[in-house]
Image (cartoon, coloured by chain):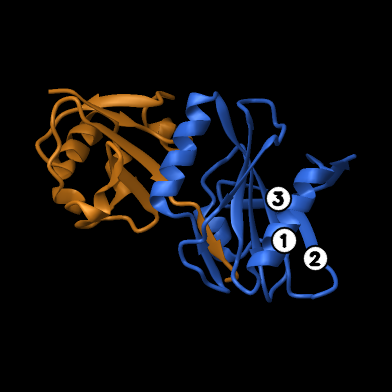
Amino acid sequence: MLTISRALYEKIIEHARKDHPDEACGVIAGPAGSDTPVRFIPMQNAERSPTFYRFDSLEQLKVWREMDDGDEEAIVVYHSHTATPAYPSRTDISYASEPQAHYVLVSTRDESETEFRSYRIIDGKVTEEPVEIAE
Amino acid sequence: MAIEVRIPTILRSYTGGAKAVEGSGATLDELLDNLDAAHGGLRERLVDGEKLRRFVNVYLNDEDVRFLGGLETPVKDGDTVTVLPAVAGGSR
């Protein structure tokens, strides 16, 4: 299960809407082992594409070092699909490499409604999980 | 000659769980061969044939080795090499 505050949930949706039609992407860091998303870190999509995303490699190094220094880890890795459903694609699955993370997928394909779903992706296996939004 | 190599979570099964290991070599290529001798299978996760894999980021200190010399990047004692799998994906 992903437990996330309403404020963070809304930040992800806002980011996805803002970058539409390009895919938006980012991380929410939290204390290592806590499974609690705390610190919202939107990332540049270095591909700047409506069908692909990739963290800029130097920005990723900076963020990963900061998390390491602060004893944090990536609790949520999120990105948006702009014309397809909020479900992990083949490439999403093959590049998923943070086994402890909740992979959040947002779809902005519908102007009036944003889909928000969360998954665990471990060793190529996708398991959807419920999302609890804490007020 | 000791070069620190920082290993991401997903590759720590090759290093017995260690976050960082040490190796030696004059180039990144040699360093990866050296590491593979102690941690078998690690090199293949980073290198495909003659080139670094596209969706793995390797850094020498603060720089991405793609902008240096790739596998031919010279390395020396006291350097830190960091490996991070790229975070990427798409609609397909």
- Local SS, label 1: strand
Q: Earlier in the sequence, mark 3 or mark 1?
A: 1
Three-letter residue code for mark 3 = Tyr
Q: Chain of mark 1?
A: A
For the residues labelled 3 and 2, the Cα–Cα distance comes to: 17 Å
Residue at the (31%, 45%) spot, across then down = B58
Residue A63 screen position, x and y as percent:
49, 40
What residue did someone put label 3 on?
A: A119
What residue did someone put label 1 on?
A: A106
- Local SS, label 2: loop
Q: Earlier in the sequence, mark 3 or mark 2?
A: 2
Colour assignment, chain A: blue
Give the left or right position of residue A76, taking residue A43 as reference. Answer: right
Q: Earlier in the sequence, mark 1 or mark 2?
A: 1
Residue A105 screen position, x and y as percent:
69, 58
Give the left or right position of residue A19, taking residue B55 as reference. Answer: right
Chain that is orange in the image: B
What residue did someone put label 2 on?
A: A114
For the residues labelled 3 and 1, the Cα–Cα distance comes to: 11 Å
**Same chain shared by disc 3 and disc 2:** yes
